Amino acid sequence: MAKTRVLLAEDHTVVRQGLRKILESDPEIEIVGEVDDGHGAVEAAKRLRPTVVVIDIGLPGLNGIEATSQILKGTEGVSVLLLSMHADDVYVRQGLKAGAKGYLLKDSEDLDLVKAVRSLARGGSYFSPSVSKVLLAGYLNESGSTADEDGLSRLTAREREVLQLISEGKTNKEIARILSLSINTVESHRKHVMEKLDLHNTAEIVRFAVRKGIVQ
């Protein structure tokens, strides 16, 4: 029987090593790669073709939710398990919208991580109990306006990338290089981000990103 191929995307080395140790305790799971940023996760997923990508939401450069969206657009037959410290409604909805099949809190038991990877490898899904409660509450109180009221939902994928890089202290020139865009295009994206979110300076952009968990 073929092993479940797992790619780990976590920027904290100690945490990543812990994840590896837990998953490798299952003889049916094989760790095929490790990366420490979102862009690396997208590239590695395309190259390594894992069965499951276990990815932290708070990755630098490109957060886990945006990376999930790009991974699933460019790689067939892969499922994504998001890791987070928070069972926040915004994170959960954005993660599901990006295509993730699982959402596991970092304070979960070791066995829960193995269960989650096994479930996703079989084509299923897996959510921490507190996350399931958030999902249930969301469905029971569905009004159709929640997503529209969430600032992040008003931004395009590219604008969210620019938002994260601004919040990480990158200049327009650095952002242009990272995203292979012209400086004028980056400036245009920055302007649109500020207009859509009603933000007026870089400090407000950073505060918004921290509040939404885009950067830590």
Image (cartoon, rainbow, N blue to C red):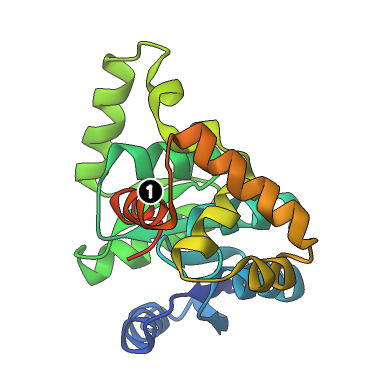
Q: What SS does tag 1 mark?
A: strand
Q: Residue furthest front?
A: 200
Q: Nearer the viewer, residue 115 or 20?
A: 20
- The quadrant holding residue 43 is bottom right
Q: Nearer the viewer, residue 34 or 126?
A: 34
Q: Name the residue: 52% across, 54% down.
A: 163
Residue 17 screen position, x and y as percent: 37, 88
From the viewer's perspective, tell me whether residue 30 is left or right of residue 182: left
- The quadrant holding residue 198 is top left
The residue pinned by badge 1 equals 126
Q: Residues within 10 Å of mark 1 (few under 14, many from 20)?
A: many
Residue 122 screen position, x and y as percent: 53, 52
From the viewer's perspective, tell me whether residue 77 is left or right of residue 110: right
Residue 215 screen position, x and y as percent: 38, 62
Q: Is residue 137 above or below residue 156?
A: above
Q: Is residue 131 visible?
A: yes
Q: Identify the amino acid type marked 1.
A: Tyr
Q: Name the residue: 25% across, 47% down.
A: 87
Q: Is residue 63 visible?
A: no
